[in-house]
Each structure stands twice: as structure tokens, then as C-alpha cells.
Image (cartoon, rainbow, N blue to C red):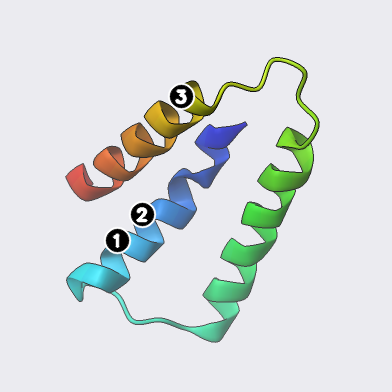
């Protein structure tokens, strides 16, 4: 489920690098995606914090690459 955060990470990195400008409509859409990921991941029986950190690090590394 964490791979669904890729567009959010890419948008945030683009804003941080000055490639894109923060817009309220896009921010709202990204917020909805993030909330959906959190809701779907909540209560996962096999949750592992180390794996989650690795996955999120990989997502942001891919966002910087793009």
C-alpha cells in the first residue's frame, strides 16, 4: 500500500526543489491519497517499522530520481 504514496512524494520533492509550485487543489488531492494509505495500512497484523522505514526511504529516493 505504501507505493501509493509515490505521487505524493514526487510532488513534495518537486516543491522542495522549486520545480513545481504548491497549489491548494493538488495538495488536497495528495492529502486524500495519504489518508487513504493510512486508513488501509492501519491495523495491519504483520506491521514492521523497519520495513516501513525502508519502503518510505525508497519512495523518496525514487521521487528525487524522477
Whichever of callouts 1 and 3 sits on the residue coming sooner in the sequence is 1
Q: In x, y percent, where is residue 57?
A: 34, 37
Element under disc 2: helix
Q: Characterize the local packing of mark 1: few (<14), some (14-19) or many (20 or more) Cα atoms within 10 angstroms.
A: some
Element under disc 3: helix
Q: Are marks 1 and 2 in contact (CB under 8 Å)?
A: yes
Q: In x, y percent, where is residue 58?
A: 33, 32
Instruction: Calculate the distance from the C-alpha at mark 3 to the C-alpha at mark 2.
Output: 22 Å
Q: Is residue 65 above or below residue 44?
A: below
Task: Please tell me whether mark 1 or mark 3 is closer to you in this view.
Answer: 3
Instruction: Calculate the distance from the C-alpha at mark 1 to the C-alpha at mark 3.
Output: 23 Å
Q: Is residue 30 above or below residue 39?
A: below
Residue at 47 percent across and 22 percent down: it is: 51
Whichever of callouts 3 and 2 sits on the residue coming sooner in the sequence is 2
In the drawing, does residue 60 fall left or right of residue 23?
Answer: left
Q: In x, y percent, where is residue 20?
A: 29, 75
In the drawing, does residue 14 fall left or right of residue 7?
Answer: left
Q: Which residue is mark 1?
A: 13
Q: Which residue is mark 3?
A: 50
Task: Please tell me whether mark 3 or mark 2 is closer to you in this view.
Answer: 3
Which residue lies most toward the front here? 49
Q: Nearer the viewer, residue 37 or 24?
A: 37
Element under disc 1: helix
The N terminus, quarter of image: top right
Q: Characterize the local packing of mark 2: few (<14), some (14-19) or many (20 or more) Cα atoms within 10 angstroms.
A: some
Residue at 57 percent across and 63 percent down: it is: 30
Residue at 56 percent across and 40 percent down: it is: 4
Q: Which residue is mark 2?
A: 10
Quarter location, residue 26: bottom right
Amino acid at each position: 500500500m505504501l507505493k501509493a504514496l509515490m505521487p505524493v512524494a514526487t510532488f513534495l520533492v518537486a516543491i522542495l526543489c522549486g520545480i513545481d509550485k504548491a497549489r491548494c487543489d493538488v495538495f488536497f488531492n495528495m492529502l486524500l491519497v495519504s489518508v487513504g494509505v493510512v486508513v488501509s495500512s492501519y491495523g495491519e497484523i504483520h506491521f514492521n517499522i523497519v520495513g516501513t522505514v525502508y519502503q518510505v526511504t525508497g519512495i523518496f529516493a525514487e521521487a528525487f530520481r524522477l
